[in-house]
Amino acid sequence: DGGITQSPKYLFRKEGQNVTLSCEQNLNHDAMYWYRQDPGQGLRLIYYSQIVNDFQKGDIAEGYSVSREKKESFPLTVTSAQKNPTAFYLCASSMTAFTGELFFGEGSRLTVL
Amino acid sequence: AQSVTQLDSQVPVFEEAPVELRCNYSSSVSVYLFWYVQYPNQGLQLLLKYLSGSTLVESINGFEAEFNKSQTSFHLRKPSVHISDTAEYFCAAAPMDSSYKLIFGSGTRLLVRP
């Protein structure tokens, strides 16, 4: 079945550590996205990538980094510079001729201890 | 700047009653409009979308939404809800001139009670 796979589903981190969240898709979509979800705030865009080897900052990119070396993969690193990293992280993808329809993974919940 | 407003953070309703979840948007350009649904600890799923044409759009599970350009609204309705409709619902807008940048509302939690 085609879809988006995020891992791990739950992750605990100590302050000062970097962590990397995995996102893989087999939908053959060119564009991929990372969103952060906090209670009562909806989704906020962290980074997006429209093609391989290219990505742009979203609204809340500070403290995060990404890479897009393969079409299928768009990993997100939460660095120690992110001041409030505890959140639910969602990866999504879309077709090139984008009309707003995103396909989401099931999310990764990061908790900083 | 574009924005999407969902005024109701939570809507409690009894099973088989009608429901309306409100969504208003603000944009200087034309937009595509969407409703997404999120079940607990899962990603979002597209419920329905308005791209062009008929202003009334329907989903396969009985929800409908109507695009009202003069009121800049895209309210979601269902004439009779089920327990299984309990979820969080997000309205979203994508400006037609940069449609990769989807803008989400803060969400409305629909709580259906027996």
Image (cartoon, rainbow, N blue to C red):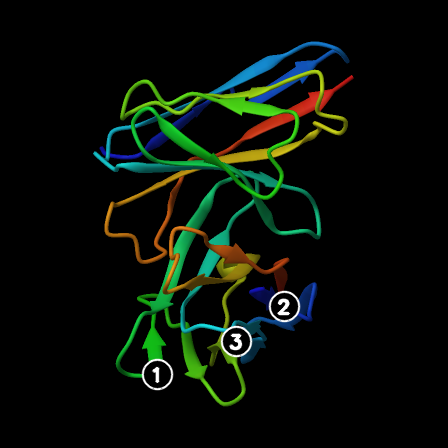
Count neighbours of disc 3 (C-alpha within 10 A) and say few if under 14, some if 14 to 19, many if 20 or more: some
- Sequence-earlier tag: 2 or 1: 2
Residue pictured at 58% horizontal, 64% vertical: B1
- Is there CB contact under 8 Å for labels 2 and 1? no
Amino acid tagged 2: Gln
Looking at the picture, tell me which residue is in the foreground, A80 or A19.
Answer: A80
Q: CA distance from mark 3 to mark 1?
A: 26 Å
In the rendered structure, the answer to whether residue B22 lies left or right of residue B74 reads: right
- Residue at 57% x, 71% y: name it: B15
Could you give the CA–CA distance between mark 3 and mark 2, rounded to whole angstroms? 23 Å
Position in image of residue A71 (x %, y %):
27, 26
Q: Chain of mark 3?
A: B
Say whether disc 3 or disc 2 marks the residue closer to the N-terminus.
2
Read off the residue under disc 2: B6
Badge 3 element? loop
The CA span between labels 2 and 1 is: 19 Å
Query: Mark 3 highlights which residue?
Result: B16
Amino acid type of the residue that numbered disc 1 sits on in the rendered structure = Thr
- Residue A29 in the image: above or below residue A97: above
Frontmost of labels 3 and 2 is 2
**Residue A20 image offset from top left, x and y in percent:** 54, 16
Q: Residues within 10 Å of mark 2 (few under 14, many from 20)?
A: many
Chain under callout 1: B
Q: Is residue A9 left or right of residue A78?
A: left
Question: What is the x, y in percent for residue B75?
Answer: 51, 77
Q: Nearer the viewer, mark 3 or mark 1?
A: 1
Residue indicated by mark 1:
B55
Q: Residue at x 39, y 56 (%)?
A: B46
Q: Amino acid at mark 3?
A: Glu
